[in-house]
Image (cartoon, coloured by chain):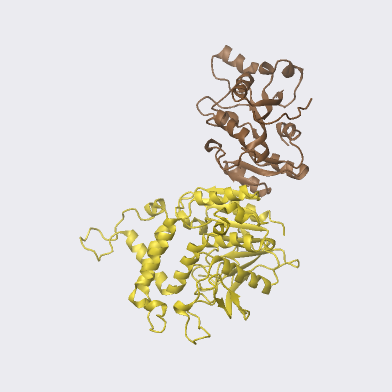
Chain colours: A brown, B yellow
Amino acid sequence: MRADLDIIQEWIPAGSRVLDLGCGTGELLAWLRDHKQVTGYGLEIDPDNIARCVERGVNVIEQDLDKGLGNFATGSFDVVVMTQALQAVHYPDRILDEMLRVGKTCIVTFPNFGHWRCRWYLTTKGRMPVSEFLPYTWYNTPNIHFCTFEDFEQLCRERQARVLERLAVDRQHRHDWGSRLWPNLLGEIGIYRLSSPGLQDHPVAP
Amino acid sequence: MSSVFPEDSVGLVEPRIAHFAEPLALACGRELADYQLIYETYGTLNAAHSNAVLICHALSGHHHAAGYHSPEDRKPGWWDSCIGPGKPIDTNRFFVVALNNLGGCNGSTGPASLNPATGKPYGADFPVVTVEDWVNSQARLADRLGIEQWAAVVGGSLGGMQALQWTMSYPERVRHCLCIASAPRLSAENIAFNEVARQSILTDPDFHGGHFYEHDVLPRRGLRLARMVGHITYLSDDAMGAKFGRELKTDRLNYDFHSVEFQVESYLRYQGDEFSTRFDANTYLLMTKALDYFDPAAAHGGDLARALAVAKADFCLMSFTTDWRFSPARSRELVDALLAARKNVSYVEIDAPQGHDSFLLPVPRYQQVFSSYMNRIAI
């Protein structure tokens, strides 16, 4: 399984009901179904990804995240997951609100634009960073709302969302001493576990 | 055509007739004491009887869904693009049953059949049948064929409604429901179109209150008009634009009302003429009523999720972007109810220009998803 998904699955309790926003080929949901008796749905818009989900028997709904989650009841999922899609939606703040409404807890992963390589690229070249990990140029990138860990956490504070857990990892999804010490500079990908302001404390993993 | 059928065809097929002497109680309060269903099967029922798939037809459909009745047939069955070896409903894996519904005009008991009480054709006296009635009659056919549980019940449009009804009437007997280009109930606009179709038939002087058989005439004009109106709703503006545009049949305008000038006029007239010679006017009325009446949520205070709560099947829903008869929004209503009822459901919205008719056509992405879903059904 994709390395970030392997980290996420540890945060999803067995038997829970999961909504996966931008579920891709359904890898996470299929794995959770087979190993943790998890039920749920994936939302996706890419035809090839949808076909792959259908093939492996993952419930997939063709639905555009930019149109919201109005068809899902408040608190109807144990966990709402969104991996590597926050930066590609039109209204990251609204989708975050929707996730917090629909899910008892939320897991969000996104690339950190505050990583030192991005900063270095922009400082030395004066141009928008292009890397192997994020190979697009500014005019054709699907990633239209980059943010840093600081930015994201600021948004969480504004929305009074509680950050239950945070992992900053590199592109191989290792979390070494560097990304632990100085995440916003040395972490490439952020993996956050959140809960909405109204909910009671959830145990935070050490 | 040559005597050899295409490799991905089920080939030569033969309809069979199942006769039922046990009375069937109908939603209208009446009953059919005795009736028959005509059906075809493709593929082989496995030893465990776990690979059976039921095909439910739409308004003008019938039991001949795939293959050919003779080597001279110009066209195969109506859903041949989706049923056959290697096709979405793969007859190498599945045993497929397709029937003509009660009230039909292709060999099952319907308005043109003899009413045992009078010795004359039923005509207008044939009871109004509903989607629920059809599903009950299909369940008896399943019993007859030794099929305890369908691997899948599949249908488009009105056929999708039957597939849906199966999951509520007989939850234990359906593992998968494929409901394509359908809706949980008709909108006022849908009913309005049906009413125009009905009025055109009912007001045809040759209709004789539904007893035209005795007068040895057919209400062709009414049926023709009904089909023309219906046909417009099966296509899309895009499809009509691409196919006909404003093209003329003649090289100039005639400034009269009786000439066939625009290509689209010619096409509609042809469709209407062809249909009025092969379809029964009373059946058309019955089919449109079955559509209008279908509303499983009605018995649950309008709550579709509650209506679907009993279902045990997994669902696959598909809609087409240019379908305005049963638009994607109608399928999404169903999806939302299934989500609220916590059912397993997948939903795909296919980008296709051909309107409602898309479900009958070999649209590549449609066939891909259809195949993927069918192939993952355990048998």
The C terminus of chain A: image quadrant: top right
Q: Is B333 placed left or right of A157 in the picture?
A: left
For the residue pair A15 and B2, the one nearer the viewer reads as: A15
Q: Is A122 placed left or right of B43 in the picture?
A: left
- Give the residue at x 65% y 47%: A59
Q: In the image, residue B342 lies at what x, y percent?
A: 65, 48
Residue, far front: B301
Q: How many numbered markers are drawn?
A: 0
Q: In the image, residue A68 lies at what x, y percent?
A: 55, 37
Determine the image quadrant of residue A204: top right
The vertical placement of B338 against A192, above or below, is below
For the residue pair B324 and B291, the one nearer the viewer reads as: B291
Q: In the image, residue A194 lies at what x, y percent?
A: 67, 29
For the residue pair B364 and B345, the one nearer the viewer reads as: B345
- Give the residue at x 77% y 40%: A14
Q: In the image, residue A160 lies at what x, y percent?
A: 62, 25
Q: Is B244 placed left or right of B292 in the picture?
A: left
Determine the image quadrant of residue B259: bottom left
Determine the image quadrant of residue B167: bottom right
- Kindly tell me whether residue A189 is visible in this rendering: yes
